[in-house]
Image (cartoon, rainbow, N blue to C red):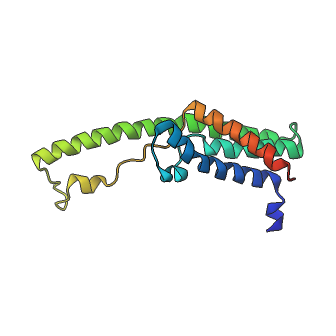
């Protein structure tokens, strides 16, 4: 266990991810004026914990092994892929989920008016659909940038103990 605790890049990354998730609650309250403690366990929001995680790891690797080391290069590449994915694919998936949830809700209201029942096992449309799709999946570029900066700062802060 002490071997893991001596691993500055690993501890830095884990602390950054944990703190990024925790600060989502007050930031969400300030920006959206909503009390939502479940935001701490969500994928989206400000700051991006994925970006904080990988940028803190990359920064700590650079500090520990040198910014010209192959470890830093590998970590940088995977960090960029992670951050690109957070703003690209996952953000678009969250937009699709929002649109689908609106369509599903509208369709459900239409079905309720007609009192439609599925031919399959006499199951209602609502039972077939289940819960709404999760909409908070990705990040806006600014949220990723804030996660990046947050992760770098955490790595520098955690580095004072190593």
- Residue 43 appears left or right of 77: left
Residue 88 position within the rendered picture, expressed as x and y whole percent measured from the top left: 54, 34
Extreme-bottom residue of the structure: 1
Q: Residue at x 27, y 55 (%)?
A: 128
Residue 73 position within the rendered picture, expressed as x and y whole percent measured from the top left: 80, 38
| Residue situated in front as seen by the camera: 76 or 64 | 64
Residue 41 position within the rendered picture, expressed as x and y whole percent measured from the top left: 53, 53
Q: Is residue 33 visible?
A: yes
- Residue 17 appears left or right of 161: left
Residue 137 position within the rendered picture, expressed as x and y whole percent measured from the top left: 49, 43
- Residue 62 appears left or right of 32: right
Q: Is residue 45 visible?
A: no
| Residue situated in front as seen by the camera: 123 or 146 | 146
Extreme-top residue of the structure: 141
| Residue situated in front as seen by the camera: 1 or 75 | 1
Q: Quadrant of the N terminus?
A: bottom right
Q: Residue at x 59, y 35 (%)?
A: 143
Figure label count? 0
Q: Residue at x 15, y 54 (%)?
A: 117
| Residue situated in front as seen by the camera: 72 or 105 | 105
**Image quarter for residue 47?**
top right
Q: Residue at x 57, y 38 (%)?
A: 86
**Image quarter for residue 75?**
top right
Q: Is residue 40 above or below residue 142?
A: below
């Amino acid at each position: 266990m002490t071997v893991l605790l001596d691993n500055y890049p690993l501890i830095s990354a884990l602390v950054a991810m944990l703190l990024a998730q925790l600060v989502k609650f007050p930031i969400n309250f300030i920006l959206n004026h909503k009390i939502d403690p479940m935001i701490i366990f969500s994928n989206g929001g400000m700051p991006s914990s994925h970006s904080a995680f990988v940028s803190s790891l990359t920064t700590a690797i650079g500090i520990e092994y040198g910014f010209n080391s192959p470890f830093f290069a590998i970590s940088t590449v995977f960090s960029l892929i992670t951050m690109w994915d957070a703003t690209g694919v996952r953000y678009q998936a969250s937009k699709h989920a929002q649109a689908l949830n609106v369509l599903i809700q509208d369709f459900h209201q239409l079905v309720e008016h007609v009192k439609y029942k599925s031919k399959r096992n006499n199951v209602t449309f609502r039972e077939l659909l289940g819960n709404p799709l999760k909409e908070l999946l990705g990040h806006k570029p600014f949220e990723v940038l804030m996660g990046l900066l947050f992760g770098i700062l955490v790595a520098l802060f955690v580095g004072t103990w190593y």
